[in-house]
Amino acid sequence: MLVVAAVVVAAVPALVQLAWLLRLFAGRLTYPLDLEWMEGGVLVHAQRVAAGQGIYVPPSVDFIPFLYTPLYPALLALLSFVFPLGYTLGRVVSILAFATALLAIVLAAAGEASGRRRKLFVALPGIAGVGVVAAGFPFAGNFYDLVRADALVLALEAWAVLLALRGRARTSALVAGLLIALGFFAKQTAIIVGVGIGAGLLVANLRRGLYYGASAAVTLAAGIGLLLGTSRGWFWTYIFKLHQSHAFRKDAVTDVAWPVTQQFLWPLFLALILATVGLALSRRLRRSDAVLWGAALAGEASALVGFATQWADSNAFIPAVFFPAFAAAVFVARLARVAVDGRKWGAVAVAVGVALLLGAQSLHTLPPAPVRGPGGRWPIFLGWPKLGRALPTVASAVPSAQDRAAARRLLDELRALPSPLFIPFHTYYAVLAGKQPFVHRMGVRDVEAALGRPKGLDQAIAEQRFAAIVLDWKSYPGEWPNLDRTYRVAGEFREGTNSVRMFAGAQTSPDRLYLPRR
């Protein structure tokens, strides 16, 4: 009964976190502007794919793609033939993908027992693992429901893990390889998690591991070949070569990513390690558990590599939360079943401890600031879960009624401006205003170090080809050559009045209107 009580206690905060996360998602779903400054740029990608224009094209004033693979905008483009393309569609896709990823955790945990009642019991640690992921929403930058590829790649990776773990035949390994390759075409960092899954599967079952690797390799080769051919090589330039021109910030790993993940996720990591030790002592570890550990370690590696990349954001931490939570949920479910069946005090004590640790992580939402301890060392056991900080505030993530009113006023003012309108921080706002979108500021930043300034951009500003330009306060001096010579400040935007901040990722908002000097 003690183990059952501990598992139930662990699941309760998870259910609260899930309900709260649904509340946050509902408050963000229909917001008509960017929650995060690259959302609209992704929609422009989808718009181009739907129109048959392609996205991997030479950089120009008209368009530069983000440095990501194309599956997510391609999926939005396909759906746009049935549903209106826009923020709501993109967020619905991300929410459904995120829910699919969470379902994989619960199913994996439920697979630790047979029989309806036993499955329901071992599913509770799966729910606790889901709560850990839900509680990680602010830690991972409020990215789960955005018009970004993160949730889609997570779903593809999660089901690859589930198939690799629970499958027994060739087909499941082949499908897992296919899914992880599709994950790469959603976001390149999926390949790191894919390697972890593959290494674990090779340990678990050499033949299935080889099938997995072959399936992934064939899918990757076919997809990359197709994209290289249709883009005349620009696909590889954007998704690989230009990444090499971005700085790898070692200090971002040593000074931020590594200490913060330890300090924030220590209850989860401790639960994972203790559950593994408990299963080993009970002789209940399986060769297939290498898949879970491979994915967990690869998830942490993916987070560190992703965050070290220049201009990375907190969404890089998503796999560092998700895959250890996946593994811990399965191990705690099995250990709880072993403890209930065997009724040995040692197993009971460990099962109760790891279940409560998993539940404690669900009470932990806000990451600590990295602080060095005596001797310059990073103290791991900081950031204790606190009930007062167990739920993120609505105001931190959800646009208020005032924000929505400001968003409407901003759109009205943009619609009233003459065309063509250049609004590089929020390119889809031009589409919403009934105008042609131009290049996104992120694209300009991505290419200028290796390929130079986009063709036609500086000339368009110098020759006053834009009838109006709207820039954010984050635009730095000299970023737009010739602007001060050929344009004048004709108006200002103020947050809460006719401009709105971001609710995820980097903070920025429209700040100034420029019109041509006459």
Image: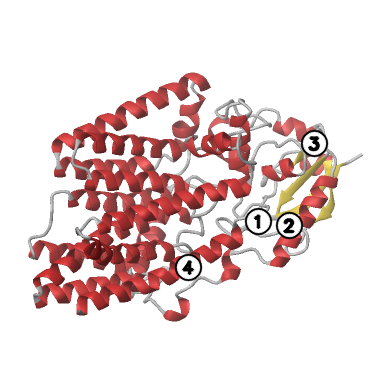
For residue 19, the mark is: 4
The relative height of residue 19 versus residue 455 in the rendered view (above or below) is below
**Residue assigned mark 1:** 31
The one nearer the camera, 436 or 92, is 92
Give the percent coordinates (x, y) of residue 477: 70, 49
- Answer few, some or many: residues within 10 Å of disc 1's Cα (few below 14, many 20 plus, some between 14 and 19): some
Q: Which residue is mark 3?
A: 420
Cα–Cα gap, marks 4 and 2 = 27 Å
Alpha carbon distance from label 1 to label 4: 20 Å
Give coordinates of residue 340: x percent, y percent.
Answer: 15, 71
Which kind of residue does numbered mark 3 sit on?
A: Pro
In the image, what residue occupies the spot 63% across and 38% down?
44
Callout 4 amino acid: Ala
* Mark closer to the chain start, 1 or 2: 1
For mark 3, give the secondary structure.
loop
The mark that comes first in sequence, 3 or 1, is: 1
Asked if the residue at tag 1 contacts the one at tag 3, i.e. Cβ–Cβ closer than 8 Å, the answer is: no
Which mark identifies residue 407? 2
Q: In which quadrant of the rendered image does the N terminus lie?
A: bottom left
Q: Can you say which quadrant of the picture contains the C terminus?
A: top right
Eyeballing the image, is 348 above or below 100? below
Which mark identifies residue 224?
A: none
Mark 4 or 2: in front is: 4
